[in-house]
């Protein structure tokens, strides 16, 4: 909800009183600001300051007191001008209107005098024993009650013209405030000790005491340690609702049938409450610095009026059933405020409603557009803390209002590069906002790329099946799985190959599919290979050749795993045999060793890519050396017969194979050792004369297969 509009009808320039009418007219013609001003009541001001403002019961006259010299002014609202002005010797504390109009009123002065005024002028003057603080008139009995610096409430009967027995208060020694209920005429007195005492004018006895000091201390109130919640304001709304103001800035709303307040409102300034008024569902409470309008049922703030640094509020007067109020303050002008949302304008200034409607239609620049609100810490950063207390800073709540031109100058001196940083920040924000409309590039992590592709595919399948799954890529707990290289999954490990041979094939197919999708969506299009269009790549992706390759890869993985397992078992067996046969070095044991060797299965060797199988070790070494030789050297070593150059630039070789038997020293010794052992066997028993030896790789069947 926006704050309501508040119109200050007393602001603007005013003309001095000593100017003649001719000079006034010339000034009004020359100065347009004086011409546009609204002067609701003529000469609605005081020479020094105003203390009290009240409206007569018939609503036709306004009376106000002020200084200096102490005086009272009466204004006729029908003519919008001052009716009369009267001066007296001492300042007026307060005054009461005795009649329905301005013809009878009484003034309580600060020097213990009470003056009675009639239509012609001052009628009578008398003195009271103690200095008075407040005064109220009881219409049914014509009694004038005066409370002051004593426990006695003085009673002056205006019908009989004499003092009656005073009411002796047991609540305290000093009476600050008096109030009379307009319905049942009960008298209330507020004391310095924070108590409210009730009196029945018919029985002349006290009927109850209410302790408001304890009730004002709540969790929502802030009471200073050096202050005491004395009663400073009392007001009735109707027969049952009572408003109490304290010296520490709290307003307590009571139902007379209960001794506990149903609403406690704190002004948060720690200043005494001067006046309380009721307007429909709203409560108007005033201290020396502000007037706050809030709802009595919820306590929510409706509007607030702030006084300037050089002014203080003294008294509040609200015209019943309207949105207009008068504020007596320590300034020459008596402030006049009009709040349309609080009520209509009074009948004698009904033109304000039409004027306000025209102002609301036109867009008006607020007064805060030329000011910048800064806190105390910001003032210290700008180096303007020395201006506190001057006219350049206007205190408001927890900070100050400073002229925007002064703020910009101080900002440029304190932070010379602030504008450049602000400009870069705005440019960066603009670029980022435009980037959101672009296609978002999906980047795969550097670690566990296959796992990330699989998770992306699972997430897409979950969306298709309407199954929401939380992806590990978006979970911060598994962030290191795709960033730390130590968490890389080793797909070449034997355990991974043996446990997941089929899953690996499925992962590869999904990986190809996902990579192709990501490349189509996000990666730049690469140049196609010459002679092979992109349609062929997509058509060959799931061809039968891929299935055959996958089958070969699967078989080779099983074979390699089986070979490694057999090799490990053989190594373990050889180690155990060596340990058992180290002590037997005789010739007799050679025969058993020879037989065991004959029984052992042949060894298989895995041929690497680019090499050919050669029977002997020497030929194998030669083939390895020849594989690294040049083409001419290999032609000379292989004994090619002829080389023909074809017309296309290719070469044709014709050659014939020749068997060369090369013996090494180790082979000669092995043959010699074999002959010696055969001779020993022939000389031995019959069953050992003709042993059968394993032919090895030189058998006929093996050579046939080799050819």
Image (spheres, helix red, strand yellow):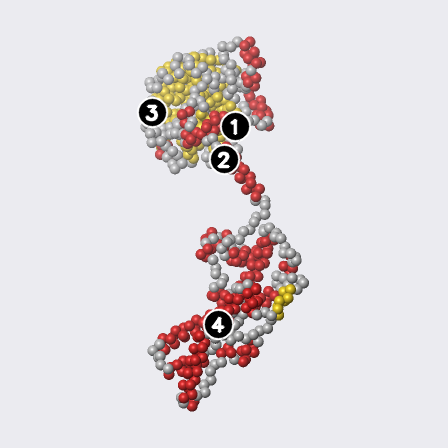
Is the C-beta separation of discs 3 and 2 under 8 Å? no
Front: mark 3 or 2: 2
Q: Are marks 2 and 1 in contact (CB under 8 Å)?
A: no
Q: Nearer the viewer, mark 2 or mark 4?
A: 4
Q: Secondary structure at mark 4?
A: helix
Q: Provide the residue designation for mark 4.
A: 617
Is disc 1 surrounded by few (<14), some (14 to 19) or many (20+) residues within 10 Å?
few
Is residue 195 in view?
Answer: no
Element carrying mark 2: helix
**Residue corresponding to mark 3:** 174
Question: In the rendered structure, which disc, 2 or 1, sits on the residue that comes first in sequence?
Answer: 1
Mark 2 vs 4, N-terminal side? 2
User: How far is disc 2 from disc 4 in space, using C-alphas?
Assistant: 78 Å
Q: Residues within 10 Å of mark 4 (few under 14, many from 20)?
A: few
Residue 131 horizontal/vertical position (percent) = 35, 19
Mark 2 lies on residue? 421
Quarter of the image where one finds residue 200? top left
On residue 369, the disc is 1
- C-alpha separation, residue under disc 2 versus residue under disc 1: 24 Å
Q: Does residue 129 appear to the left or right of 382 in the view shown?
A: left
């Amino acid at each position: 909800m926006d704050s309501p509009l508040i119109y200050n009808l007393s602001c603007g320039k005013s003309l001095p009183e000593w100017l003649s009418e001719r000079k006034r007219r010339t000034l009004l013609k020359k100065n347009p600001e004086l011409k546009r001003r609204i002067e609701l009541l003529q000469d609605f001001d005081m020479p020094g300051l105003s203390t009290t403002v009240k409206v007569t019961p018939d609503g036709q006259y306004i009376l106000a007191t002020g200084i200096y010299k102490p005086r009272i002014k009466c204004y006729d609202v029908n003519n919008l001008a001052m009716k009369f002005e009267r001066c007296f010797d001492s300042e007026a504390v307060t005054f009461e209107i005795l009649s329905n109009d301005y013809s009878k009123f009484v003034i309580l002065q600060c020097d213990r005098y009470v003056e009675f005024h009639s239509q012609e002028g001052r009628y009578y003057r008398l003195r009271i024993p103690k200095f008075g603080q407040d005064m109220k008139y009881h219409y049914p009995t014509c009694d004038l009650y005066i409370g002051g610096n004593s426990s006695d409430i003085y009673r002056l009967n205006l019908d009989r013209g004499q003092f009656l027995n005073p009411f002796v208060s047991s609540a305290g020694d000093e009476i600050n405030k008096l109030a009379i209920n307009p319905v049942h005429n009960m008298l209330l007195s507020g004391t310095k000790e924070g108590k409210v005492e009730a009196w029945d004018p018919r029985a002349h006895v006290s009927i109850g005491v209410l302790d408001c000091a304890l009730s004002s201390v709540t969790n929502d109130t802030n009471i200073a340690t050096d202050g005491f919640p004395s009663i400073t304001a009392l007001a009735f709304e109707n027969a049952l609702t009572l408003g109490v103001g304290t010296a520490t800035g709290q307003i307590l709303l009571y139902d007379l049938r209960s001794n506990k307040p149903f609403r406690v409102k704190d002004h948060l300034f720690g200043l005494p409450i001067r006046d309380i008024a009721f307007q429909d569902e709203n409560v108007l409470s005033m201290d020396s610095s502000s007037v706050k309008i809030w709802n009595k049922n919820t306590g929510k703030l409706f509007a607030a009026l702030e006084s300037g640094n050089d002014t203080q509020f003294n008294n509040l007067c609200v015209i019943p059933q309207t949105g207009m109020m008068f504020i007596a303050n320590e300034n020459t002008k008596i402030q006049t405020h009009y709040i349309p949302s609080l009520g209509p304008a009074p009948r004698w200034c009904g033109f304000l409603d039409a004027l306000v409607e025209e102002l609301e239609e036109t867009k008006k620049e607020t007064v805060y557009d030329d000011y910048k609100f800064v806190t105390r810490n910001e003032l210290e950063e700008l180096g303007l803390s020395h201006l506190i207390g001057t006219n350049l800073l206007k205190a408001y709540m927890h900070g100050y209002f400073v002229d925007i031109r002064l703020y910009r100058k101080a900002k440029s001196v304190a932070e010379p590069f602030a504008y450049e940083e602000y400009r870069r920040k705005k440019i960066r924000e603009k670029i980022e906002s435009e980037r959101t409309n672009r296609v978002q590039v999906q980047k795969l992590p550097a670690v566990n790329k296959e796992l990330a592709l699989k998770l992306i595919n699972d997430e897409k399948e979950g969306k298709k099946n309407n199954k929401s799954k939380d992806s590990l890529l978006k979970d911060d707990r598994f962030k290191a799985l795709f960033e730390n290289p130590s968490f890389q999954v080793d797909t070449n490990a034997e355990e991974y190959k043996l446990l997941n041979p089929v899953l690996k094939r499925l992962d590869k197919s999904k990986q190809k599919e996902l990579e192709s999708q990501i490349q189509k969506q996000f990666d730049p299009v690469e140049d196609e290979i010459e002679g092979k269009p992109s349609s062929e790549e997509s058509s060959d992706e799931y061809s039968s050749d891929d299935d055959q390759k996958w089958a070969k890869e699967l078989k080779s993985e099983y074979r390699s795993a089986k070979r490694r397992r057999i090799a490990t078992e053989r190594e373990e067996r050889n180690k155990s045999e060596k340990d058992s046969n180290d002590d037997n070095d005789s010739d007799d044991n050679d025969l058993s060793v020879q037989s065991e060797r004959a029984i052992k299965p042949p060894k298989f060797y895995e041929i690497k890519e680019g090499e050919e199988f050669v029977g002997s070790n020497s030929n194998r070494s030669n083939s390895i050396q020849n594989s690294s030789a040049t083409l001419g050297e290999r032609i000379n070593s292989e004994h090619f017969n002829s080389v023909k150059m074809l017309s296309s630039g290719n070469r044709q070789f014709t050659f014939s194979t020749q068997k060369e038997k090369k013996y090494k020293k180790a082979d000669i010794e092995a043959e010699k050792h074999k002959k010696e052992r055969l001779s020993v066997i022939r000389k031995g028993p019959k069953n050992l004369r003709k042993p059968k030896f394993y032919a090895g790789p030189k058998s006929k069947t093996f050579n046939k297969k080799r050819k």
